[in-house]
Image (cartoon, rainbow, N blue to C red):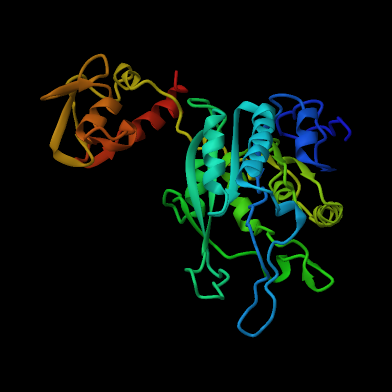
Amino acid sequence: MSPEVTGSRPGERPPTVNLPLDQVLQGDCLQILPRLPERSVDLVFADPPYNLQLQKELWRPNLTRVEGVDEDWDRFASFEAYDAFTRAWLEGCRRVLKDSGALWVIGSYHNIFRIGRILQDLGLWILNDVIWIKTNPMPNFRGVRMANAHETLIWASKSKGSRYTFNHHAMKELHGGKQMRSDWLIPVCNGRERLKDEGKKAHATQKPEALLYRVLLASSRPGDVVLDPFFGTGTTGVVAKKLHRRWIGIEREPRYVELARARIAAVAAEPYAPEVFEVDDSRRRPPRVPFARLLEHGLLRPGQRLYFRRDRAVAARVKPDGRLKLPDFEGSIHMAGKHLSGGSPCNGWEHWYFEDEGGELQPIDVLRRRLHREWGGE
């Protein structure tokens, strides 16, 4: 492992020093993670062994053998052995995560609940559990259980209250303009995307690029360092390269390392341009303007009525200091909106309306933007 930095791309934030960026490191993650610098990684995506506990071969009704997971890397002597392994790699990942970093881990009913408890015991803070619903799951051929049609992803910050990246608006765009939900309907990896080795699946649990695309777009920015301690055939690296994230892959199996390196080398990523690849919500946020500035510049009048969510029956009076006066409450535009919403968070700029010269109701956000445009948001 070479602790070298190849340099940041134009317009991207400088990467953390002393990292083997954009490399597949062959070896056991339990041995390699301690050699990475502390607090040096922005995001971890982990697809660890599932400990499927398979006892015998599985056959389809047409007498063809199911190519499941039967490699040595998925075999553990006991639940205790698997738990010890899980704690070790999670501790290693948490150590290398920046305080503002986050971790995603995927698993099935065989292991995800054990992983969830251990990561909580280590101080990681669960933000969401996401259900990956497979549009084309493998049936239960023996007919003794329901078809297992989903896997679970846990998204966690490094600790309770720590800051983390979430590109809310980018996720809304992927969900047709609506807030991204925690159930993701994505096909399993198949077709041309599925890597083959001598006509068979190269890796039994290769994840679809669409799944990693959502993970990386949701919780990282261009130039961020993404670590995958169970790299497999390199899906994380492929998507990271396309989105201009830096990546580090750790993989124990030599044949997977070879496949991953060749696969990533074949990716032709588009040249980086900040205006194209940046989806940070801060680029879309309206300018920060104190509400009282609208009064100072005459865009609103002291005593003027504002209407909540276009309802003329729900009005507040604007006090000279910028607070709103309701019959039973007094506070900022946000707190007054929260009060009327029964305690739900409320962006006052979007939900309070004023009456323009033509008698039409307009959101006060129009005035904020006018102030920023004409006076520079002073």
Quarter where residue 6 is shown: top right
Q: Position of residue 299 (x, y in %)?
A: 30, 25
Q: How many marks?
A: 0
Identified at 51% across, 48% down, the residue is: 171
Relative depth, front residue between 209 and 340:
209
Identified at 64% across, 40% down, the residue is: 86
In this view, the residue farthest toward the bottom is 62
> Is 227 situated above or below 201?
above
Q: Can residue 283 be seen at all in this image of the molecule?
A: no
> Is 228 situated above or below 331?
below
Relative depth, front residue between 316 and 35:
35
Identified at 14% across, 39% down, the residue is: 312
Q: Can residue 161 be seen at all in this image of the molecule?
A: yes
> Is 34 situated above or below 170?
above
Q: Position of residue 167 (x, y in %)?
A: 53, 40
Q: Is residue 134 left or right of residue 216?
A: left
